[in-house]
């Protein structure tokens, strides 16, 4: 008999990767959840044999419906959908910053997934895409890293639900290799007037930052977590790459000449990325440098534990058409 995995965020990066991993495994039926079953990406999954159902992370009843009969649930919340929604500025409380509002909404979404998962009687595993608790693991030094702590607090909530005892695991995504292009960050390599390629970013150029080819490697990591014991917390890191090496490897693989990395101040970085965006990204990197992106938690395991082959940044660069990425080059 086929087993059922229900995948949230199937039209996004992480959920797509999970769906690909299970599509290529015999014995599985896949149900994908989306807010819009008529979207182009939802239709593509349907043509691949995925059952697509409507569901909204803000509406726990729709999640309960979507989860009926699930053996495995993969849950992901998206802080940035909330951040980019113009309605969020209208809905936030007076005096509340946008990122504080996004924290509240994302945490509630995480609680909704856990509450709905708890109603599935024969569930074997609920795997949530979380992040380290920056405030707790930095002794409050990084107490305003909202897109991390919202996920970490949602994971703490899921662990407190008796019906999920022995069923819950976590996976943490590293920084996506393509992130600079997708957000048009200053760390996107740019061609300078002298013909060299340069980038500017936060933090020193020589410290490693955990990256990964999340679209390709995340799904196999989720599958390994599903097949492992409950309470697994996997940090799905691909490779630690410093900003200087990021630029060097990018240039070497594209046949460009590197003009070097420039370290920006926190204030300058936030000026370039207003509205809390610069703050969240900058502190994400600075927290990773000082406390470890996964909070240096010894209980967190890495892909080596499962013998998973992770894509290096050089391999990613060799197979990527950077001109086709959002923002191009
Ligand atoms: N980018 C990075 O470097 C990085 C690193 C670590 C962690 N993360 C985290 O990864 C998360 C985003 O994951 P992703 O990159 O896979 O997302 P994504 O590619 O941006 O796609 C967002 C997904 O979320 C779904 N979604 C958004 N709001 C929803 C709602 N209210 N109800 C139901 N579904 C909803 C969308 O589905 P529909 O539109 O089809 O409804 C879509 O599938 C963020 O929270 C981010 O903080 C990102």
Image: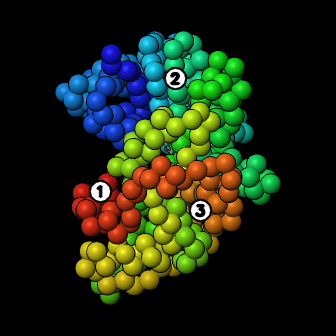
Residue 211 x/y as whole percent = 47, 60
Residue receiving disc 1: 325
188 relative to 274, above or below: below
* Label 2 to label 1: alpha-carbon separation: 37 Å
Residue 62 lies left or right of residue 301; in this view the side is: left
Which is more N-terminal, label 3 or label 1?
A: 3
Which residue has dot 3 on it? 285
Check disc 3 and report its element: helix, strand or loop. helix
Do the numbered discs 3 and 2 sit on residues whose CB atoms are within 8 Å? no
Q: Which image quadrant: the C terminus?
A: bottom left
Q: Position of residue 253 (x, y in %)?
A: 28, 74
Residue displayed at 30% across by 34% down: 25
> Residue at image x 32%, y 54%?
326
212 or 229: nearer the viewer: 229
Q: Is residue 169 left or right of residue 142?
A: left
Label 2, ligand 1: CB separation under 8 Å:
no
Mark 3 or 2, closer to the camera = 2
In three-dimensional space, the C-alpha distance between marks 3 and 2, rounded to whole angstroms, equals 35 Å
The residue under label 2 is 124
Q: Which residue lies furthest to the bottom in this view?
A: 194
- Secondary structure at badge 2 equals loop
Q: Label 1, secondary structure: give it.
A: loop
Q: Residue 117 occupies which quadrant of the picture? A: top right
Residue at the image position 49 percent from the left and 73 percent from the top: 243
Residue 242 in view in this figure: yes
């Amino acid at each position: 008999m086929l087993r059922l995995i229900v995948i949230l965020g199937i039209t996004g990066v992480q959920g797509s990767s999970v769906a690909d991993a299970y599509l290529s495994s015999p014995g599985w039926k896949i149900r994908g959840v989306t807010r819009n079953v008529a979207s182009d990406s939802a239709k593509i999954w349907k043509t691949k044999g995925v059952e697509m159902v409507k569901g909204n992370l803000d509406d726990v009843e729709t999640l309960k419906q979507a989860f009926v009969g699930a053996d495995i649930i993969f849950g992901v919340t998206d802080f940035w959908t909330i951040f980019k929604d113009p309605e969020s500025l209208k809905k936030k409380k007076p005096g509340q910053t946008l990122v504080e509002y996004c924290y509240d909404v994302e945490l509630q979404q995480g609680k909704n997934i856990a509450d709905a998962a708890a109603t599935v009687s024969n569930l074997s595993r609920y795997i949530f895409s979380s992040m380290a608790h920056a405030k707790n693991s930095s002794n409050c030094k990084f107490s305003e890293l909202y897109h991390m702590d919202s996920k970490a607090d949602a994971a703490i909530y899921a662990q407190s639900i008796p019906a999920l005892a022995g069923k819950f695991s976590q996976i943490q995504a590293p920084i996506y290799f393509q992130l600079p292009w997708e957000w048009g960050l200053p760390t996107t390599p740019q061609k300078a007037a002298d013909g060299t390629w340069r980038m500017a970013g936060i933090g020193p150029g020589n410290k490693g930052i955990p990256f990964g080819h999340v679209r390709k490697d995340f799904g196999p990591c989720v599958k390994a977590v599903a097949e492992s014991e409950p309470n697994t917390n996997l940090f799905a890191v691909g490779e630690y790459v410093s900003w200087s090496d990021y630029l060097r490897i990018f240039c070497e693989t594209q046949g460009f000449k590197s003009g070097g990395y420039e370290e920006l101040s926190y204030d300058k970085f936030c000026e370039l990325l207003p509205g809390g965006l610069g703050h969240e990204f900058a502190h994400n990197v600075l927290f990773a440098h000082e406390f470890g992106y996964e909070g240096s938690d010894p209980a967190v395991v890495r892909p080596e534990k499962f013998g998973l082959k992770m894509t290096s940044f050089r391999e990613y660069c060799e197979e990527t058409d950077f001109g086709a990425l959002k923002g191009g080059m």
